[in-house]
Image (tube, rainbow, N blue to C red):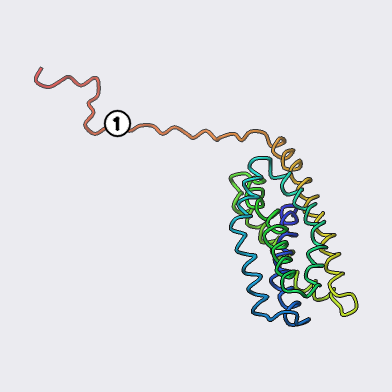
Amino acid sequence: MLGALAGAAPLFVQGLLAGFMVTDVSVINEWIPRSEALMLLTFSSFFHIFTIPAFAALSDRIGRKKVMVGGAIFSAIAVRPMFAMFNTGDPLWIGAAFMLGNPIIQASMYGPIGAFLSEKFGTNARYTGASLSFQLSSIIGAGVAPLVAARLTSAEVGTTNPAVYVTVIFPVPGAAVRSLVPFVSRWRCCRGPRRRRARPRRSRRPSPTARPASCPARGG
């Protein structure tokens, strides 16, 4: 469950931008056409090609924990400016908001998440554990993002409530990352080294052409 919480916030931002903010800026407020909003989202998603491997490589150098906790702190601070850019209604600032949210806020934690989850499980359960954690992150993160944002948005306050909500949830994965690393370390220490089971030795059957030592040699 801690692994699922570690990836919930960046996936929430992904679902928020793709599932709600495109509709908010194009259909609800009619600041820009829907086709232009989708183009801005696609353009910002293109930079994931560079930023996700960059954050993953950074985690190889300084550690997964530092990158993910630092990404959670930075994202909690940067979410409010991102929503402020959206609320200007200007196409240039809306594009900048997509650029801040997609390839920077989301990628800062999304880049190391694959290796981070894989390293938390032993080889006998690594694929199952990492896959289950990631799918749960998608459900509680990206899956509910449009519903939560639509419920919190109102004509009186605009997107202020969703901005506060996203700001509050980003410390949750940071705390989960800090809690998961010591917990897994203690669990592995308690287990101790794995012992291999001794395989029973199979008795070799005599070859059909083999001659018993007591039989005299022919022609001698």
The residue lying at 71 percent from left, 75 percent from top is 22
The residue lying at 35 percent from left, 32 percent from top is 204
The residue lying at 83 percent from left, 66 percent from top is 163
Coordinates of residue 173 in the picture (x, y in percent): 77, 54
Find residue 158 and report its image quarter: bottom right
In the figure, 181 relative to 128: above or below? above
Find residue 138 and report its image quarter: bottom right
Quarter of the figure that contains the C terminus:
top left
- For label 1, the residue is 206
Please say whether residue 143 is visible from this viewpoint. no
**Horizontal side, residue 61 vs residue 16: left or right:** left
Q: Report the amino acid beneath label 1.
A: Pro
Coordinates of residue 180 in the picture (x, y in percent): 75, 46
Coordinates of residue 30 in the picture (x, y in percent): 75, 82
Coordinates of residue 178 in the picture (x, y in percent): 78, 45
Quarter of the figure that contains the N terminus:
bottom right
In the figure, 13 relative to 111: above or below? below
The residue lying at 77 percent from left, 74 percent from top is 147
Front position in the image: 19 or 86: 86
